[in-house]
Image: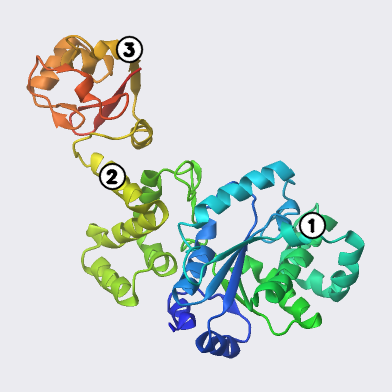
Amino acid sequence: MQNIYSELDWRGSIHQTTDRERLCSLLAENPQTVYAGFDPTSDGLHIGNFVPLMMLRRFQKAGHCPIVLAGGATGMIGDPSGKSEERNLLSAEQIEHNLQGIMDELGQFLDFESARPAILVNNYDWMKEWSYLTFLRDVGKHFPVNQMLAKESVKSRLDQSEAGMSYTEFSYMLLQAYDFVHLRQAYGCNLQVGGSDQWGNITAGIELGRRMGVGTLHGLTCPLLTKSDGAKMGKTEQGAIWLSAEKTSPYAFYQYWFNTDDADIDNCLRLLTELTEEEISALGEDRQTNPQNRQSQQRLAESLTLLVHGQQGLTGARRASEVLFGATISEMSDSDLTEIFADVPSEKLSRDTLGGEGLSIVDALCQAGLAKSRSDARRTVDQGGAYVNNARIENLDYRLGPGDLASETVVVLRSGKKRYALLKFL
């Protein structure tokens, strides 16, 4: 069986762990059941979820059984870890909607159909059976308040926030801790993994397991995905980078990783991809000798886009990238072109304009604002500076027709090397 601890170690995926020697031995002896939880604070997964997801994926590939816990119950409370203020409580309907969105994306990372499949559970299924009094009596009695107050997730909120922390959030730790105990009893789960901000919740579960007599439990946290300057990765001016194509297109996803700084690239390759140590080392050597090639960034972008969006998503992202370097544009979608040329001026024309004799290249350049006058447009064509979908137009009599649509409704015009405009025929 693959030495999963050793792999996680060289990848830099281990931030903290309980009883390292015992955990290493346990993982080497027999297949283990390991879990990570994801609360439904939104209707999809984002880059912040990537590292623990990849950790579960690596465990499964090494022969262990991963459990994904969807926090239908804990999502109603809100995890205070890493938060400076209390979350807005979500309605039951919103939580159910969010859970479905998360579940739909998990199959891209984990195998739920193999002989040793991943398991998906929802903690609402067992928490709904508890009454408040019974939970306090059977679980709450095992939590000394002084130990709870010493947890970093609690301490930092009480020290830094004027609003402090509500009893609701303070109780979150009990719910997550009991999840661990339940999964040990129901599935023989011995190990919980999560981001480094989950250490307090994980150790609370381990201690609860000891007090309730379910045996020795283990915890392992991975570092949060940050840049070399300490800022969290996965944010742009447009917002978070999501794993859903509906929220972040494969092209935007690809470009985000392709634009990774050299200072951050090695960490991302180790934490997020399935490239071997030798492959990552070779890319590092190439960066030293040929930094202008950006081979590391390309491998990172391709590996992650393929994993998250599949071959079709990667192919589309590559084509979109090639467009910006002058490749001929055809058979793309309106949404892709709109995103690629988000900052480019566009004009809307009637679809009928493409019928009959079509629209002359001279009029098209004028309509798009790429020429000040018809004579200016003719001069652009004569000088070889007019392009339709990145194909040079040298004939002044050229007329746009339905065959010039690069997507459902869009024709991409270019004047010179960099001046683009879109004509949308609706």
Above or below, 44 relative to 217? above
x 92%, y 63%: residue: 133
Circles 3, 2 touching at the beta carbon (< 8 Å)? no
Q: Secondary structure at mark 2?
A: helix
The amino acid type found where label 1 is placed reads Lys
Q: Mark 3 to mark 2: distance in Å?
A: 29 Å
The amino acid type, in three-letter code, at marker 3 is Ser
Q: Nearer the viewer, mark 1 or mark 3?
A: 1
Question: Element type at marker 3?
Answer: loop
Q: Residue at x 72, y 84 (%)?
A: 215
Mark nearer the N terminus (3 vs 2): 2
Disc 2 or 1, which lies upstream in sequence?
1
Q: Is residue 122 left or right of residue 224?
A: right
The image's mark for residue 321 is 2
Q: Amino acid at mark 2?
A: Ser
Percent of width and height locating residue 343 = 37, 31
For the point 37% across and 63% down, which residue is it? 265
Rendered location of residue 134, percent (x, y): 90, 65
Direction from residue 242 to residue 318 in the image, left or right: left
Q: Which residue is mark 3?
A: 350
Percent position (x, y) of residue 249?
A: 41, 43
Residue 277 tag number: none
Q: Earlier in the sequence, mark 1 or mark 3?
A: 1
Q: Quadrant of residue 359?
A: top left
Q: CA distance from mark 1 to mark 3?
A: 57 Å
Reading the image, the residue beneath label 1 is 128
User: From the viewer's perspective, is residue 321 above or below residue 234?
Assistant: above
Q: Helix or strand or loop: what does disc 1 sit on? A: loop
Quarter of the picture holding the C terminus: top left
Please tell me in which quadrant of the rendered image residue 221 appears. bottom right
**Residue in the image at 41% along x and 63% along y:** 264
